[in-house]
Image: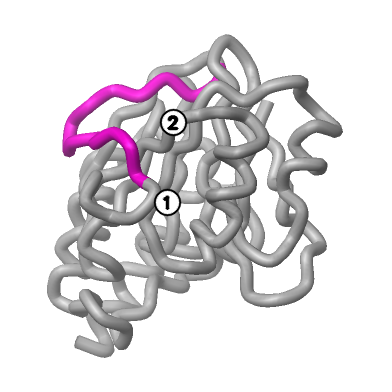
Amino acid sequence: MIRNLAAGQAGMTSNVFLVDGERTVLVDVGTGFNVVDLARDHVDDVDAVVLTHTHPDHVGNLDAVTDAFGVDVWGFDPDQKGVDHAIDDGDTVQLGDHKYEALHTPGHKNDHLCLYAPANGVLFAGDLVFANGGFGRTDLPEGDRPTLIESIERLYDRVEGNLTEVHVGHGPSIETNPLQDIELALQAARMGA
C-alpha cells in the first residue's frame, strides 16, 4: 500500500510516500511537519528512506526520521548530506512488495531519481513531472531545461505502455491515464526551451 503522509500539510513540503509491505520504505521525507508520528499511525517501523532528490523540501525531516527509526538513507549521490548509500541508474530497489528500477533523471537537480516498478506499473516521479503536464523547475541551482527534457523523454520511453499510477513530489498522484500527463509535461517543457 502507498500512502501520502504529507496530504493536507500546509507549507512548502514535498509529498512523503509510505510504501509498506515486505520492505517498508519512505520515499522522501518532506519538511516542516511531524512525519514520524504520521508514519507510526500506519506502521511500527520503517526499513529505509529512499530520496528522489535532496532539495530541502524533500529532506527537511530527514534527521527526525533517521533518529526515530534508525534507518539508512538511499539516494543517487552519497556525497549529499544525509545520504548513506548510492542508488545508481539502473539499480533495483525494493519498495513495499515490489522491485523498482532506478532511473537517473537530472534537469531539476543533478541527483534526481525516478523509481519505476514494471510489474505493477507504478512510478515515483519526484519533481520531474506532475499532474496535468507540470514539470520540475529549472531555475534553481543544478536546474537545466534541455537536460530536464532529455530526462522526461527517457522516462516516457521507459514507462510507455505499462503505466498505471504516478506518485509525484508535489500535488496529487496521477491514477487516470498517467502516460498522458507525462506526454503533456514533455510538450510543455519543450515549448519553453
- Mark 2, other Cα within 10 Å: few <14 / some 14–19 / many ≥20: some
The local secondary structure at tag 1 comes to strand
Relative to 101, does residue 82 appear above or below in the rendering? Answer: below
Q: Quadrant location of residue 24?
A: top right
Res. 125 mark: 1
Q: CA distance from mark 2 to mark 1?
A: 21 Å
Could you tell me residue 150's position as x and y percent?
Answer: 15, 63
Tell me what residue is drawn at x 18 percent, y 36 percent: 88
Residue 174 visible in the displayed image: no
Relative to 65, does residue 190 appear above or below in the rendering? Answer: below
Could you tell me residue 1's position as x and y percent?
Answer: 68, 25
The local secondary structure at tag 2 comes to loop
Tell me what residue is drawn at x 19 percent, y 51 percent: 154
Relative to 102, does residue 173 appear above or below in the rendering? Answer: below
In the picture of the structure, the residue carrying the numbered disc 2 is 72
N-term mark: 2 or 1: 2
- Mark 1, other Cα within 10 Å: few <14 / some 14–19 / many ≥20: many
Q: Are marks 2 and 1 in contact (CB under 8 Å)?
A: no
